[in-house]
Amino acid sequence: MINKLYMLSSLTFLILIIGCSNNDDLIKQATEELDYDVLLPSYIPSKLELVEVTLEDDRLFLNYQDTEETTFIEFSQRQFARGIDTERFLEFTETGEDPYEKFPKLSYREIGNYVGEYEDREKIHRLSFMFIPSVPRSQIDNYPFYHIRAVGIDEEDFHKVVRSLN
């Protein structure tokens, strides 16, 4: 019985090590192969750990979760900003005019070096930020697209994660 428990715990540990190694390998592959700046957070709340990394074409997806799977941060990035109005984001950085002024859950925001659409769903404890680098069009050819979504994270920690992206 003790040998079976030892073997089971050893196998579980080995699977965890292989999973972590695979995640690290995929992140390294993405930073080397993708044609845009791959952003990685240097700050993640301590109760979360990286549980999934997916690299599919030009899309990199990172998933951080707590052990109960009730709190998480999902971060996806793509080479081109599709379906969002990058010009309006950049206009917002210059004028401060927010097209969502009358909608309390949605707004344009600048967080750190990024500008985008911010959503706060207080009732379900969900925050979301679709963004691009806050860089003038003259300094960049195409804007990569980034989206970070969190459940169960307070707003202060969410902003710390976004500001830590590099």
Image (cartoon, grey):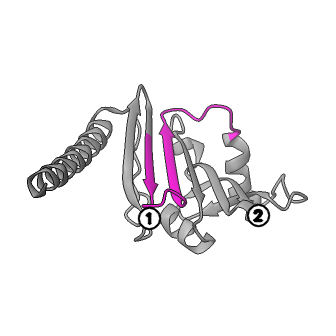
Rendered view: 135 above or below 60? below
| Image side of residue 108 versus residue 18, left or right | right
The magenta stretch spans residue 66 = yes
Report the residue that reaches farthest toward the right.
102
Q: Residue at (66%, 59%) from the top-left corner?
A: 126
Label ID, residue 92: none
Identify the residue position indicated by label 1 in the image.
164
Viewer-proximal residue, 66 or 50?
66
Q: Residue at (53%, 71%) from the top-left corner?
A: 157
Report the residue that reaches farthest toward the bottom.
156
Q: Which one is earlier in the sequence, the residue at label 2 or at label 1?
A: 2
Identify the residue position indicated by label 2 in the image.
123
Viewer-proximal residue, 94 or 111?
111
The quadrant in which the N terminus is found is: bottom left
| Image side of residue 166 versus residue 90, left or right | left
| Image side of residue 140 versus residue 94, left or right | left
Q: Neighbour class for label 1 at 10 Å: few (<14), some, many (≥20)?
A: some
Residue type pointed to by label 2:
Lys
Answer whether labels 2 and 1 touch (C-beta < 8 Å): no
Q: Neighbour class for label 2 at 10 Å: few (<14), some, many (≥20)?
A: few
Cα separation, mark 2 vs mark 1, equals: 26 Å
> Helix or strand or loop: what does disc 1 sit on?
loop
> Helix or strand or loop: what does disc 2 sit on?
helix
- Place of residue 113 in the rendered image (x, y in percent of width and height, measured from the top left): 53, 60
The magenta span reads 61-85
Q: Residue at (14%, 52%) from the top-left corner?
A: 10
- Place of residue 151 in the rendered image (x, y in percent of width and height, measured from the top left): 60, 59
The magenta stretch spans residue 143 = no
Report the residue that reaches farthest toward the front.
1
Residue type pointed to by label 1:
Ser
